[in-house]
Amino acid sequence: MGEPVVKTFGILTSGGDAPGLNAAIRGVARTAITQYGMKVIGIEEGYRGLIQGKGKELAPESFSGILTRGGTILGTSREKPFKNDEINPDTGLTPVQQIKENYKKWGLDALVVIGGNGTNTTGYLLAQEGLNIIGLPKTIDNDLECTDVSFGFHTAVSVATEAIDRLHSTAHSHNRIMIIEVMGHKAGWLGLYAGIAGGGDVVLIPEIPYHIDSIATHLKERQAEGKNFSIVVVAEGALSEEESFMDKKTFKQQRKEMPYSIAYRVARELEEATGLESRVTVLGYLQRGGTPTPYDRVLATQFGVAAAHMLSRGEFGKMVTLVNGKLEGVPLEKIAGKTKRVPLDHPTLVCGREVGTCFGD
Ligand code: F6P
């Protein structure tokens, strides 16, 4: 084995936390240290720490006992350095200039960024600025382009599915419509998978604008069959057909002004349309917390190990992806600024329709 291209690299986690972040950090660092003798600089709080110079060398022991832990040992933030032009009063530098300065100061040959769309888009822009970047795909939303799956998604689907399973008891006992809101502003992967896994009667995702009348008809048909309860899974970005015709700005403003989340509106609309009692559960951050599933641990480890090998080969400007069971690096420009939404002919969606799930259209 020849000399690795990278001797020292930085690593950060950015964006919302997700189960598997620590497993990914461990995968990269252990391989980089034990296989290639690299030095690892752990950067705290995502890009904010990179701007502020919050980083230190991490000893191999730092990566012990973290595989199963939720959250991230490095901390995270939603800092977007390219959207922040606040000059540092001490150095007179912009956030991006500050990042380049710290990269040089720490003697980094490369930077591994672990996160979702925002993180990998920033990674792409930093690569354009001349930094050697490798991205890893993390998101419970599963909406990163060019990879079949991102780590964190499987765990979130399990959490949401268990919640749906538990809601069935109350739905059934009280003859109610139980509405559960899951995450997913732009893409409905989580709602779709948890909805199918939990046997949701109605699944509303951002890709399919809903008509309340279609849902009401579906629920009344269930009632006519003697099924007096229903489970409705609503992604936080679900929208009505009327809203789907709005321009982006008006829609965003309207949602900002809405004093409650979408599930509450759907509950009210369904009560009015069906006369059935309904109740809402918003799962929120429970979907991002806690121990990753074994699948996510393995996936995050595999992504991490692949990133370490890419560091050794000097394969930069790419995000690690899983396509048809194969790990490969895809240029960041193919991922930056994009969102992988659920295609309307996706087999899981089609299979949901086959078993009678109503998608609100
Ligand atoms: O990006 C993942 C995600 O879980 C979204 O589904 C959700 O809308 C968002 O994070 C909210 O996160 P925060 O409140 O931390 O910004």
Image (spheres, rainbow, N blue to C red):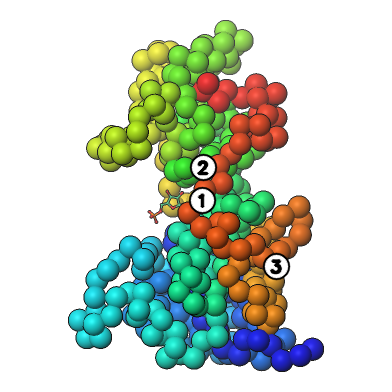
**Is tag 2's residue or tag 1's residue first in the polypeptide sequence?**
2
Q: Which residue is mark 2?
A: 187
Mark pair 2, 1: CA separation: 11 Å
Label 2 SS: loop
Q: Badges 3 and 1: C-beta atoms under 8 Å apart? A: no
Q: Position of residue 273 (x, y in %)?
A: 40, 13
Q: Which residue is mark 1?
A: 338
Q: Nearer the viewer, residue 358 or 68?
A: 358
> Does residue 115 lie above or below 5 as drawn?
above
Image point (35%, 79%), residue name? 97
The kind of residue on which mark 2 rests is Ala
Crowd class of label 3 (few under 14; some 14 to 19; many from 20; radius 10 Å): some
Q: Position of residue 51 (x, y in %)?
A: 36, 77
Residue at the left extreme of this rendering? 89
Q: Which residue is mark 3?
A: 302
| Image mark for residue 275 | none
The kind of residue on which mark 3 rests is Gln
Q: Badges 2 and 1: C-beta atoms under 8 Å apart? A: no
